[in-house]
Image: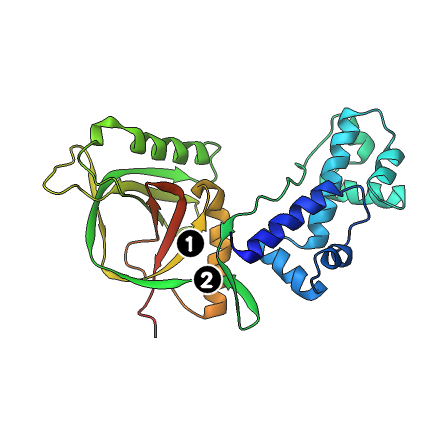
Amino acid sequence: MNLYVHTINTVVEHIEQNLSEPLTLQSVARQFYLSEYHFGRLFKTITGTSVKQYILGRKLALAAEKIKCTQSSITEVALELGFEYPEVFSRDFKKWFGVSPAAYRNGQNETAPMPKAFIVDRDIMNFQGVLALKETYTYLHEQNLCGICIEVDENADDFYDKLQSAGEGFLTSSQYAGCLKEDYFYTVINCYGDDSGRYSVFYGGEPAHGSRAPHLKIRNIPAGWYVCFSYRGEMLDMLKTFNDDFYKWMSVKEIEPCPNSIGMLTIYDRQDMQNISILVPVKQPK
């Protein structure tokens, strides 16, 4: 695990185990022997939220659970979670959930609690004082993949279920046995470019030598330069994180993609499906 990612993963566990304490950016940074400035930037880069907002969100999430599931008074819950003044707790609670603690206890609710941060394992580096993805560049020769293609809408309730079932169905289907090489599995993701949230997702592999893949679509991967990022874990957990990481990386490195019909190419090692390479076409690096 990347050192930066490991540090924040440990920080998240520390916060979770000490939600009843008066946690602050300063106290947590001191606990991990980090400067407040560096720690704040690091936490925001890895989790996508500030230390202050995360601590408050997690305290309020636990408070909401206690309000729902115990007979403790609102004041008791506030004091138990380190709020010095119950009125400050009530104000923060209403600002977060849209209703007062008392109304929340009576079943009124508009906003979901902040979940515990899920830390995506990827390679982060310090580039000229800015934390960003660590990249490598690779030149791919043109190749054809064989597979299936689906269309999804990220705004639909079944977005993640549809992605997962299609990928798992393709990997486990016996009808493709012997037609495709078994060392790597690929996905190609393209958005329609109209802010509709609709994507085409191709699942496939390299055709085995001399074989024909019945009922499979051909997807061409153009030759060219690609920037490559290493992630570890489940791809569905990484989608939003990668989008945020990538746009920040482009800003830091001042590099633009080079459209070539491939939005994002993902390569999985079939021996270790948690080991993922994400490639995006770019102009030839200098």
Residue positioned 19% across, 52% down in the render: 143
Of residue 111 and residue 140, the one placed in the foreground of this image is 140
Q: Choose top left, top right, bottom left or bottom right for residue 19.
A: top right
Q: Residue 236's spot in the image, x, y percent?
A: 45, 41
Q: Residue 7's spot in the image, x, y percent?
A: 61, 54
User: Secondary structure under badge 1?
Assistant: strand
Residue under pointer 1: 230
In the figure, is residue 260 to the left or right of 215? right
Check disc 2 and give the amino acid type: Lys
Residue positioned 39% across, 36% down in the render: 163
User: Secondary structure under badge 2?
Assistant: loop
Q: Does residue 166 sit above or below 280 in this rendering?
A: above
Q: Residues within 10 Å of mark 1 (few under 14, many from 20)?
A: some
Alpha carbon separation for disc pair 1 and 2: 8 Å
Residue positioned 21% across, 59% down in the render: 141
Q: Residue 183's spot in the image, x, y percent?
A: 27, 43
Q: Does residue 166 sit above or below 21 in this rendering?
A: above
Q: Does residue 100 sit above or below 206 in this rendering?
A: above
Q: Choose top left, top right, bottom left or bottom right for residue 98.
A: top right
In the figure, is residue 241 to the left or right of 108? left
Kindly indicate whether the residue at mark 2 contacts the one at mark 1 (C-beta within 8 angstroms).
Answer: yes
Q: Earlier in the sequence, mark 1 or mark 2?
A: 2
- Residue found at the very far left of the displayed protein: 210
Q: Quadrant of the C terminus?
A: bottom left
Res 257 visible: no
Residue under pointer 2: 134
What colour scheme governs how the chains and residues are painted in the rendered image of this protein?
rainbow
Check disc 1 and give the amino acid type: Ser
